[in-house]
Image (cartoon, coloured by chain):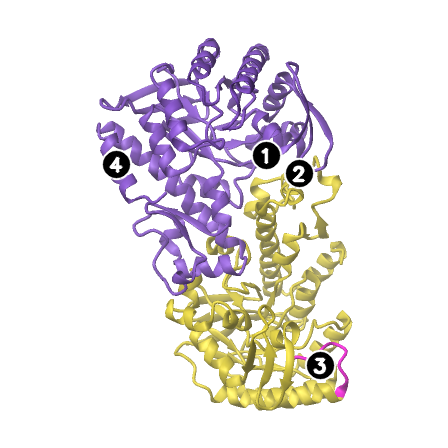
Chain colours: A purple, B yellow
């Protein structure tokens, strides 16, 4: 039911343009996935996401488990129906959030005991429970339950987490999923080359339709992330999409594609939007700034998004400065379109064997 | 350029169904106008407002004068272009907000000295300045600068305000407007029959294309408001729309239409939406309540709004309970549609000479 076809592989770089065929439609890769943590991409309607070029969204198992509870979503007819989104949905496993948002009580081979970040209630998350929740949510792509270490973790910590992640992966793979659901395992190993290789080796048997690279963009310097991707690049399977988790700045997406990555997700475009920041080809623009007070041009000249076609910087600045919700909404639309267009442009560059040239030209203008 | 045609007057009640022809399109009356205080109807895009049946929106002179400043809106090409709304806009005069939101420093025949509600800066608003601001904003319907007293003001206070309002009206009428702009004068007089009559008498010479009834829904009991409308009903001119300012609950709109009112506005539908309240034909529904946790039916069965067509009470409750902006947005859409449909239904009832029957049936189900 799921199939990944390479349409073209860039001769010089190995960057890929593909088609990921799913029961809910074809995803053209490289692809950027907006994040709808609580069954909503903050402030946006599904129709707007589609207009902005979103082919698939990500939602968070941890959050939905706590609120409204996966049982409610299941009885609503699943996450697609609940949130009115008929294209594919990827759900993460809850692993990352357990470590980043909760008060950890105990972690063992069995699972993770933690206190909820919003009401302090105690929970025990296991690979089996993560699968059960994701099955109830009815997402298309289910992520394996993993342990993600911080970017500066020592080797022993990283190795322990790796071993635990592999143990959990076996249990995730043994769990039943719904028809139409597939499991993406996650490669860990922190910033250690040998651990990354070991993790990949042990993960490969479980990678059927796709594989993810986790534990990057977790506080390490960017060159370190690229180094790890370089290690994995020749070893990752070719016949399935490769998903770099939690990455969503333009430069990192480009560097990822150059290293054979096909899928990306990040809260960045909507999060910075709510703070009044627009993502542009010249880098981030603080629309709140006084310089835009009487600037009646669009956020980005030539952008085809709803926001740029209809509103000025001055108007959006006014909305942001008066705490009007519509301001963050307009910037969210633009920022998501900025990233979906970037992946579309990258795809085109791959098809034309000029990925490196495109990357170079883009990054020359783009201020990080 | 502006013309009001009575399509039908309900035989029994005198309720009116009309067409208010403006340079930016025909407004079918009775009409409810959503409020876009700061050049945005909170959280909504113009396309959504149109889909929800909005024919005209109101925006606030006081707020736009303070932020972003009417000069910026003027240089943006006017309010329509600034906010991307091509249907008619009515702007209030700033009078009401000066009294309700600001720290008043001095009020005289000349104008009002006040401190801004958001940064404490000092301003002096006069009829001339109000006209100048509204001209810069480029709204279609300009409201006269008036003094609105509280629902429990004594007669002396009400009379002083009335006199000041008439004095200011003369100056508003003397001010130049843009081509295509028209002035609506406002009848005041608080809860005193004779003052209402006096105010109307003195206002009539300035009512060319429309007339407003102000100073109601300002804290007085509803029967008192209806009483004042009863006094005015036979005296108000027939050949122009009659606008009851600041009224937007279903019952008050119905009672207003029964008393010959054609236009209404209120922040209610969007304000209560943000608090998680839906407006329905059975009265307000607190969607946040636990009873809707697993209620997968729409907010209002049979409602044709985007929200009711696509989302459940359980989903919206989840969004409201997790402070997700999209929840308030979905309820805003529904609430506005609820009121635009109510005015459409009233119009139909008027055309069929059964306004009273409609009102009776509606109010029997509607819990205030």
Q: Is residue A166 above or below residue A298?
A: above
Region rendered in magenta: B148-155
Choose top left, top right, bottom left or bottom right for residue B153: bottom right
- Distance from Cα at disc 3 to Cα at disc 2: 44 Å
- Residue A82 has which mark? 1
Q: Residues within 10 Å of mark 1 (few under 14, many from 20)?
A: many
- Residue A360 has which mark? 4
Asked whether the residues under marks 3 and 2 belong to the same chain, the reply is yes
- Residue B190 has which mark? 3
User: Residue A54, percent across and down?
Assistant: 42, 36
Q: Chain of mark 2?
A: B
Q: Chain of mark 3?
A: B
- Distance from Cα at disc 4 to Cα at disc 1: 42 Å
Asked which secondary structure carries label 1, the reply is helix
Q: Residues within 10 Å of mark 3 (few under 14, many from 20)?
A: many
Answer whether residue B311 is magenta in the image. Answer: no
Q: Nearer the viewer, residue A297 or A367?
A: A367
Whether residues under marks 2 and 1 lie with C-beta atoms below 8 angstroms apart, the answer is yes
Asked whether the residues under marks 4 and 3 belong to the same chain, the reply is no
Answer whether residue B152 is magenta in the image. Answer: yes
Q: Chain of mark 1?
A: A
């Amino acid at each position: 039911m799921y199939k990944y076809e390479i349409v073209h592989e860039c001769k010089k770089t190995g960057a890929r343009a593909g088609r990921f065929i799913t029961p809910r439609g074809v995803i053209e890769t490289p692809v950027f996935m907006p994040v709808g943590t609580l069954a909503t991409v903050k402030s946006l309607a599904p129709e707007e996401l589609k207009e902005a070029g979103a082919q698939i969204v990500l939602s968070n198992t941890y959050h939905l488990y706590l609120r409204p509870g996966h049982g409610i979503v299941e009885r609503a007819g699943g996450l697609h129906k609940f949130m009115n989104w008929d294209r594919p949905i990827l759900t993460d496993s809850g692993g990352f959030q357990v470590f980043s948002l909760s008060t950890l009580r105990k972690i063992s081979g069995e699972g993770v005991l933690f206190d909820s970040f919003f009401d302090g209630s105690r929970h025990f998350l296991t690979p089996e429970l993560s699968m059960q929740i994701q099955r109830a949510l009815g997402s298309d792509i289910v992520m394996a339950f993993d342990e993600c270490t911080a970017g500066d973790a020592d080797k022993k910590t990283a190795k322990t987490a790796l071993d635990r992640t592999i143990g959990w992966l076996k249990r995730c793979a043994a769990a039943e999923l719904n028809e139409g659901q597939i499991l993406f395992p996650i490669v860990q190993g922190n910033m250690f080359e040998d651990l990354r290789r070991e993790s990949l080796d042990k993960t490969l048997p479980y990678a059927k339709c796709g594989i993810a690279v986790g534990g990057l963009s977790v506080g390490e310097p960017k060159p370190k992330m690229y180094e790890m991707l370089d290690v994995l690049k020749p070893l990752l399977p070719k016949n399935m999409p490769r998903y770099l988790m939690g990455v969503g700045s333009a430069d990192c997406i480009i560097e990822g594609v150059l290293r054979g990555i096909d899928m990306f997700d990040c809260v960045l475009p909507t999060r910075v939007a709510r703070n009044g920041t627009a993502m542009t080809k010249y880098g981030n623009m603080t629309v709140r700034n006084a310089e835009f007070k009487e600037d009646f041009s669009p956020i980005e000249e030539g952008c085809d998004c709803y926001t740029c076609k209809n509103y000025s910087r001055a108007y959006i600045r006014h909305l942001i400065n008066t705490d009007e919700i519509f301001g963050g909404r307009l910037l969210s639309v633009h920022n998501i379109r900025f990233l979906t267009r970037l992946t579309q442009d990258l795809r085109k560059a791959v098809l034309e064997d000029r990925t490196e040239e495109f990357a170079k030209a883009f990054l020359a203008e783009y201020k990080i």
